[in-house]
Image (cartoon, rainbow, N blue to C red):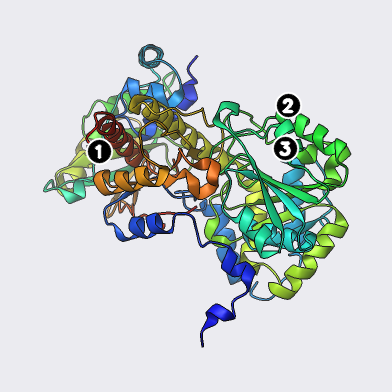
Amino acid sequence: MDYNDKISDVVKMVPPSAIRRFFDLANEMKEVISLSIGEPDFVTPWSIREAGINSLVDGYTHYSPNAGYIESRKAICDYIEKRYKVKYAPNGEVLITVGGSEGLDLVARALINPGDEVIVVEPCFVAYKATVQFAHGVPVVCETKPENDFKLQPEELEAKITDKTKYIIMGYPSNPTGAIMTREDLEKIKDVLLRHPDIVVISDELYAELNYVDEDPCSLIQFEEIKDRVIMINGFSKSFAMTGWRLGYVLGEKSLIAAITKIHQYCIMCSPSMGQLAIIDASYNGLEYVKEMKDEYNHRRRVIIEGLKNAGLECFTPSGAFYAFPSIKGLGLTSEEFCEKFLREKHVAIVPGNAFGECGEGHVRISYAASMESINTAMERLAEFVKEIKEGKHNA
Amino acid sequence: MVDRMELLKLIKNNAKLSSKEIAVMLGTTEEDISNELKALSDEGIILGYTTQINWEKTEKESVIGMIEVKLSPMRNKGYDHIANLLCKYDKVTSCYLVSGDYDLMLIYEDDNLREVASFVSEKIAPLEGVLSTKSHFILKKYKIDGIVSERNDRDDRQTVIL
């Protein structure tokens, strides 16, 4: 059977990844220092793992309710209230999903009619655009720029809004740039939303706890006048080092949560039960571990910033997540060429910026979810590499 | 301004860090860190810098005894007098006053079992105020001062994850 004729046009249209070739090369090479990993290097804190183990011992091996155990939903709502000072009802305003990614997909399928436009704030996590396309929507890119610290600019956002715009999707703290939006920044976005009362916002806040400037996370959900138009995608993967557990959640207005729960019910049934018990522990007792990990990331962040400075690469100061997104413009190489050469010659893997949208071209993503030892060695090699390029060895 | 607790936590885990490296990690100057480290030493908060060694992997043969000592406190001096006396032996590597069934916990390191036993019977037991002793010998060290001895540094994450 030749499936080329059978596979849907929309699936064929979505490219596997902008950097497939680089991807394969990096995975083939041995003894590589990898600063290209978008997940914590920490293992899930022990007490959370123990709660997961105990859930099995106690026999939590059945389906949970579609939306998740009520105790787990309550734990999530209590955590959100503690951290954001915003209340959500455990019964009706939260759905526990298989990671944040499922939430992105559910919302796209629940909201998009074919041809609807969705404004995607780039550079961004690779799934934003794809989930919109799979749902037959039209992604409209709103680029952010280093001169604005990769923050979403209200006037640039407003310029992209048409009468077909269904929703906006943005993720701060940002993968791949490490940018954050402060309350003042979000205030201006709120004003745009007030002028366009039909538009919904998906706010991906997976990295919310990893903000090195503000002690407490800030979010569009905190503006009462637009709260019902904000859908928060969140989860435990990044902040609590729980990527493999695949547990996230969506918070939003009741009728929206009911709609996405319908899709979730038919496609997934429910999120893994044992992990749902573990996130109760994470929600109530996990913040002290989050702080420990955050302090450690922050030390590494400063070492990376210093390393980039020494290497002579321009980089706006990243304030969140665990990424830096320096510019490599002016070195005569594309992002992919730079990363490939760096990998081949210095055995360090970092990710070409164009993987996260066209406006990421000219940048590279450096993850500091790696040991300090790896970071130090990688930064030394980066400085050597940039020096060699500048001396023309690579252009000869 | 250097956050003292953050600085202490950092060097507790890695005493080898240079002032320059610490300065970068904490976002301050090398001079500030050097001054703070000096102040911490002067105030007796930093007592020294040591290395955690897994002697079991070397040729060195040694025996570590954990010795419980029950005391009757001396008038005006409590337990301090005997504790200070026992601390004078270099082979006593730690000495704690503890609550519970006994009063002092000594960690004592020597070449062999016999040496430890004779230290207990000849040096500790005869002391005035010592009521009784009980010795335990360490068979295997699993975790020392926060460091697990059989370390697993394996990183099984994929090379690239977006």
Q: Is residue A3 left or right of residue A151?
A: left
Residue A157, disc: 3
Pick whichever of labels 3 and 2 is earlier in the sequence.
Answer: 3
Report the residue at 55% width, 59% height from top.
A50
Pick whichever of labels 2 and 1 is earlier in the sequence.
Answer: 2
- Name the chain under label 3: A
Against A361, residue A274 (above or below) is: below
Residue A267 seen by the camera:
yes
Percent x, y of residue A104:
68, 57
Few, some or many residues within 10 Å of mark 3 (<14, 14–19, 20+): many
Q: Which amino acid does label 1 sit on?
A: His
Percent x, y of residue B105:
36, 38
Comparing A108 with B4, the one in front is: A108
Q: Number of labelled discs?
A: 3
* Residues behind callouts 3 and 2 on a single chain: yes
Comparing A195 with B125, the one in front is: A195
- Name the chain under label 2: A
Q: In this view, does A24 lie to the left or right of A133?
A: left
Pick whichever of labels 1 and 3 is earlier in the sequence.
Answer: 3
Residue A191, disc: none
Q: In which quarter of the image is the C terminus of chain A?
A: top left
Residue at the disc numbered 1: A394
Alpha-carbon span between mark 1 and mark 3: 40 Å
Residue A176 seen by the camera:
no
* Quarter of the image where one finds residue A105: bottom right
